Image (cartoon, coloured by chain):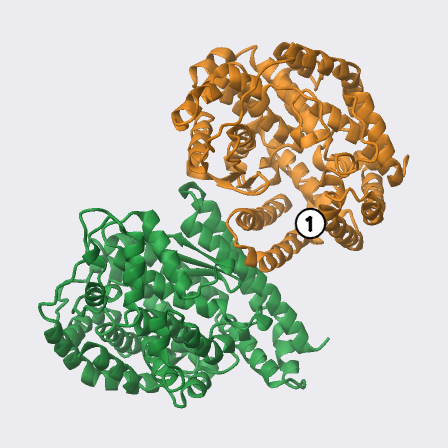
Chain colours: A orange, B green
Amino acid sequence: MSSYSKLKAHFQKIYHFKHLSAIAGWDQATMMPSGGNQARSQALAELSVHIHNMTTEPQLEEWFSSAESEPLSSLESASLREMKREWRQASVLPAKLVQAKAIAGSKCEHAWRTQRGENDWVGFEKNWQSVVALSQEEAQIRGQSQGLSAYDAMLDIYEPGINSAQLDTLFGDTKQWLPELINQIIEHQQARPTLRVSDKPFAIEQQKALGVDVMKLLQFDFERGRLDVSMHPFCGGTAEDLRLTTRYDQNDFTQSLMGIVHETGHARYEQSLPRDLLGLPVAEARSMGIHESQSLFFEMQLGRSADFIPHLSTLAKKHFTEHPSNLFDVDNLLNVYTQVEKGYIRVDADEATYPAHVILRYEIEKDLINGDIKHTDVPELWDLKMQQYLGLSTNGNFKNGCMQDIHWTDGAFGYFPSYTLGAMYAAQFMASMKQTVNVDSAVQSGDLSPVFGWLNDNIWSKGSTLTTDELVKQATGSALNAQFFQDHLKSRYL
Amino acid sequence: MSSYSKLKAHFQKIYHFKHLSAIAGWDQATMMPSGGNQARSQALAELSVHIHNMTTEPQLEEWFSSAESEPLSSLESASLREMKREWRQASVLPAKLVQAKAIAGSKCEHAWRTQRGENDWVGFEKNWQSVVALSQEEAQIRGQSQGLSAYDAMLDIYEPGINSAQLDTLFGDTKQWLPELINQIIEHQQARPTLRVSDKPFAIEQQKALGVDVMKLLQFDFERGRLDVSMHPFCGGTAEDLRLTTRYDQNDFTQSLMGIVHETGHARYEQSLPRDLLGLPVAEARSMGIHESQSLFFEMQLGRSADFIPHLSTLAKKHFTEHPSNLFDVDNLLNVYTQVEKGYIRVDADEATYPAHVILRYEIEKDLINGDIKHTDVPELWDLKMQQYLGLSTNGNFKNGCMQDIHWTDGAFGYFPSYTLGAMYAAQFMASMKQTVNVDSAVQSGDLSPVFGWLNDNIWSKGSTLTTDELVKQATGSALNAQFFQDHLKSRYL
């Protein structure tokens, strides 16, 4: 048996355990009664130790080095590269550091859940100090092993191939035009009426039926997936069995509905990964940014477009028969779904202001992880940048400032850029798709197969066989370029 | 660290993986869309290999032998005994035999799903031959390692401590009075009217609400469990998070409802196992027979009793407001739930005829596993015994005869006696409980706490700290005795 075959069998085994982790995690968020939580958390922790042990088994190093001199097809070479990547990411850190960061992160995150509401920066900072220090140590070790700067090594976890030099260009460019564009849009939209709320609640059952209909329109495969409810919506499960969740608000159906469109983008990517390779890292989604590009393609490029909203209008009128129908009129839904506003909170931001939130975080976390600023500098920098990019001050307002996100509480530095990379990829994919696909007429007709065909051929079916850069170049003819995103915003909002 | 402590930590780890297996298995039966089945089956198979490997790890043998000379409390000694039992059961068979039996069993069971409907004994017999031969080999190896006869070693898997000499006495005695008693009951019940079916279907939602109400009456803990739907009802999940299932028939609510009562008996046993020991084999349910004694206590001793049925009547009337209410009258439900009939099918049998089905299977499988008869003798013996015990012939009727059960198709020989042992234990527990608890008034009042208090003190909270024999003697003052069961049948049905 060749070393490559041994590696393949080994990673396929790991895949089975990840399957169980995904399903038990989904169950924990959707089905489990509260009394089961402790036992479930212990079981999942034990499983994650087992997966980590399998991914870092000592014999793998030897298999990797001998596999590299075996005759491999280009697909097998890509597969080997991705297995190695997974192994390296898992193996590079000393177990003691992993454990120390997990403990500090979990302590900080747990306390944050209370401290945020209390605007308690002082309390938070005491725990966060260790998380930052341990993340800096992690970043240095990762960087040294790959010849990368500390922060670039953290980026590589979520967005392999991207580095801060590229992001400085992309985001630096965006910073030049975004604040002014936001101001123009807001002026443009002034006094535009939007109607969201009705005296009569939107029944959960009807919202769910509407959501299912929209998922069908988006060709979600219900033979290999479900829609359920969880506190924090997510797209979980496995490529063979996608578990999508949402949360319904009886007073406003619009957010949950668009959330479903967003998660369906993630889900269709997963459902369409190369089936004959499933079980191997090379069959997995390319990166967090590419994943987000699919959810944002569904949400922003399709879902909030003037051609798609008539479908939402028709379906909403079908399901909500007892509400004033003007709530569901195309014009009203279009206004609701393209409203731009400056705000403090990233997760509530629209597609125009969202990049400002991300660029701010990118700039701060890069300097923090590279050791160029101290963690105590963060609130002041946050305030400064919020004023620059969105004209809002967060002076003394920690809970709506630097304490608003969960990511940093347990040390997930390097993740934030993926959101805006995703938005930019999505805009570039749409522009490229339009060169060969009649997107407008497909969306208008309600049969989106040509759109999904393009995504399938160019993105979904590729898994991780290509690097991110190769993927984007093959799909669009050029490397990632923020111009497409700018053009998209201008064309939609001005 | 003592060897006992090492063993304890090791078995607690195994427990976490069993938790995941239980939840993923429950999901497969209740939630999973069909397209997820292959990936799930592979993942569960991989997990079961992992659990088997952990249970048979070579170092355990050494830990067991040194733990035996360590100073242990009596609880720790019991814990050690149960760990050792689990290890021995898993370790005694050569891996090749385990695999061969799994393959032959799976092939035979799969083909049986079609062959049964086609009454195809000839086709079935070809596959079953290997299952029987491999089971005989398994039984011999197990027997040799424990100094037991082949069949007694199979019994020991499901019912530790019981042997065929005891069963010969218990069942031999029962055979003397049961057939005549059944005839008497049927004569006694002649021309008794029962009403089950309505023109109007019983909506699933109302049936579920009724089921939940009955589970609450039976003090099922919904903070640590759920009720869902599956093709074949079961009680799954873990002690901390019980997953009970049922199947609704829109034409007849009575079967699903009593099924829920039955499964709730299993569930409450699991929910009440000694919490401070959970994770160790000594905290698990004592045996299949004791488990069944709890479901049958709930179903037969409580659920179908004249004092309990008024509660079912009241709740059914509360939920089914649009049906003729005489369907739910106490007298009618009592007739429905205590109807005795001779039939071919074990799973459809009532509590009076059920033991006849079990004794027949016991006698045949004992001789088969001990090599005293050939597998080709089974149909004729089945026909003969059905005529003796129930006056029915299965000559040429394989599908309603020896091909009706799944158990033998994959070699689960030794399991059947548990059903009737359970019924007998349940009757003995009730007789004993009545000496100190005013059961009648508790059941009539609807607050069953005194009943559950007795079960908790004497059965549930004991887990596997005692042997089955000790458990029964401590709870009832004597070893298992079929007289209590006979008395129960006579008092209820004559």
**Residue B454 location (% of width, % of height):** 44, 79
**Residue B151 location (% of width, % of height):** 36, 78
Tell me the quarter of the picture where residue B164 sits: bottom left
Disc 1 on helix, strand or loop?
A: helix
- Against A394, is A27 above or below? below
In the image, what residue occupies the spot 60% across and 34% down? A285
Tell me the quarter of the picture where residue A235 sits: top right
Q: How dense is the environment of label 1, judged by Cα within 10 Å: few (below 14), some, or many (20 and up)?
A: some
- Against B4, is B224 above or below? above
**Residue A457 location (% of width, % of height):** 53, 23
Tell which residue pokes out farthest to the bottom in this image.
B477
Quadrant for the N terminus of chain B, please.
bottom right
B311 vs A47, left or right, is left
Give the letter of the chain under mark 1. Answer: A
Using the rendered image of the protein, determine whether residue A77 is visible from the camera's viewpoint: yes
Which amino acid type is marked by label 1?
A: Leu
B368 vs B141, left or right, is left
Tell which residue pokes out farthest to the front in this image.
A199
Count the numbered circles shown.
Answer: 1
Depth order, front residue of A199/A226? A199
Depth order, front residue of B493/A78? B493
Using the rendered image of the protein, determine whether residue B127 is visible from the camera's viewpoint: no
Tell me the quarter of the picture where residue B101 sits: bottom left
Residue under label 1 = A60
